[in-house]
Amino acid sequence: MPTHHNVMSLLRAPGQGLLTVTTGTGEAQKILNPLFGRKNLENWLPVSRDRRLERGPHILGFPSDAGGGICRGAAHGPLHLRAALYSREPHWAAHDLGDLPCIPQLLEDSMLNFNQRKKSGKVLWGARFRPSSPVSPLNLLKEALIQGFRENPDDFSPLVVGGDHSTSWAVTEALFASRKMKNLGILHFDAHTDLMEHRYGVEHCFATWAAHCMKRFAGKQKKNFVQVGLRISGKTKAHWERKFGLQQFWMKELQKQDPKIFAEQLIRGWKNRGVKHLYISFDVDALDPTLVPSTGTPEPKGLSVAWSKKVIEVVSKSFPVIAADIVELAPVLGGKSESRKSSKNSALIAESLLKALKRGLH
């Protein structure tokens, strides 16, 4: 029998999951505090527990960028994205479960020796720590999502707000462990393929999650993994499609594509291969860097917000979206105007994902 860990009991109030000397910024907290109330923020766990057992969608902050490899800063994304989202659409704040606690020097438990796991685990879990307890951010996220799907199987519908793109390894592993990979389609927006099997010998990072995910698909199912917005790689489209069996759509193919027609093309393919539901992973560097300059690896000539939102809207009307994430917003990179613009446009995508998740629950 698998060991169940009550990871949700570790949740912190929104904006308090990054375990540094000081978390968040005064500007963002000014927006979040009135939405949640000081009393609720000081006694967050009962609020979070009640919310995760209600009908979704559920917003889960994941302030970890230890899996980043170029410029760090995505650990601050969850707080700033929420501030932008809730200032625009405050009703979404009622769906917030809070933040997972992320020790910023850690990423995945297999990278740690037992002594380090024990020391950090005792800080997180206290007397409840056991040798099997998850400690690193990715392991905590994986177990939290498994717990959510187990406790609320019909109505748990997570939007994970990261964090760097290693986040998605935990999401896909949780979907696999929860037996949700069968008949699953994955829509991955990104400027990069993230298909390295390791990076300098490191198995878990922003560049490897998609390669690990492909191991969970078999045969023709592999084609249900669709990557959109790609524009830079050391290998060709033909190489990646041949090696992994997935589908890629590079920017040079999409520049004149109507988003509705493109989405309908995806829908036909997924239906023909028996897809019943979707997981959407959105790396904000899929968008043009004039729209989101505050990200670790901006690439020129990207997608527009409107085009991306229309694709998400159309596909989610044909398939329930059972999980989603939005990653790689790094608001500490660039000046204040770049940060505000990046957070605003990322929040527009997050709002679209939340609507897709909500639509899937009807």
Image (tube, helix red, strand yellow):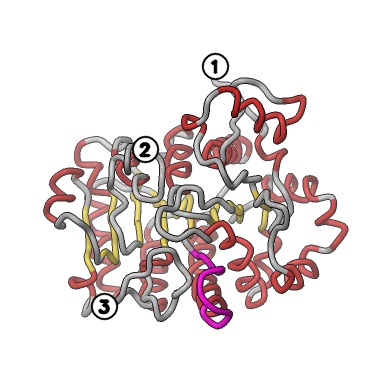
> Which quarter of the figure is the N terminus placed in?
top right
Q: For residue 332: magenta?
A: yes
Give whichever of 231, 2 is nearer the camera.
231
Q: SS for tag 3?
A: loop
| Structural distance between the alpha carbons of marks 3 and 1 | 49 Å
| Structural distance between the alpha carbons of marks 2 and 3 | 37 Å
Identify the residue shown where x is 47% and y is 41%: 170
Amino acid on which the number 1 mark rests in the picture: Met
Q: Which residue is mark 2?
A: 203
Q: Nearer the viewer, mark 2 or mark 3?
A: 2
| Structural distance between the alpha carbons of marks 2 and 1 | 27 Å
Identify the residue shown where x is 60% and y is 34%: 135
| Nearest to N terminus: mark 2 or mark 1 | 1
Residue 288 at x, y percent in the picture: 36, 76
Q: Quick one: label 1, few (<14), some, or many (20+) residues within 10 Å? A: few
Give whichever of 302, 22 is nearer the camera.
22
The image's mark for residue 332 is: none
Q: SS for tag 1?
A: loop
Q: Quick one: label 3, few (<14), some, or many (20+) residues within 10 Å? A: few
Residue 215 at x, y percent in the picture: 29, 36
Q: SS for tag 2?
A: loop
In the rendered image, is residue 319 in sight? Answer: yes
Marks 2 & 3, CB-CB < 8 Å contact: no
Q: Main secondary structure of the magenta part?
A: loop
Q: Which residue is mark 3?
A: 258
Q: Is residue 137 left or right of residue 44?
A: left
Amino acid on which the number 3 mark rests in the picture: Asp
Give, as a single range, the part of the protein colored magenta.
329-338
Q: Quadrant of residue 7?
A: top right
| Nearest to N terminus: mark 3 or mark 1 | 1
Residue 332 at x, y percent in the picture: 56, 68
The image's mark for residue 1 is: 1
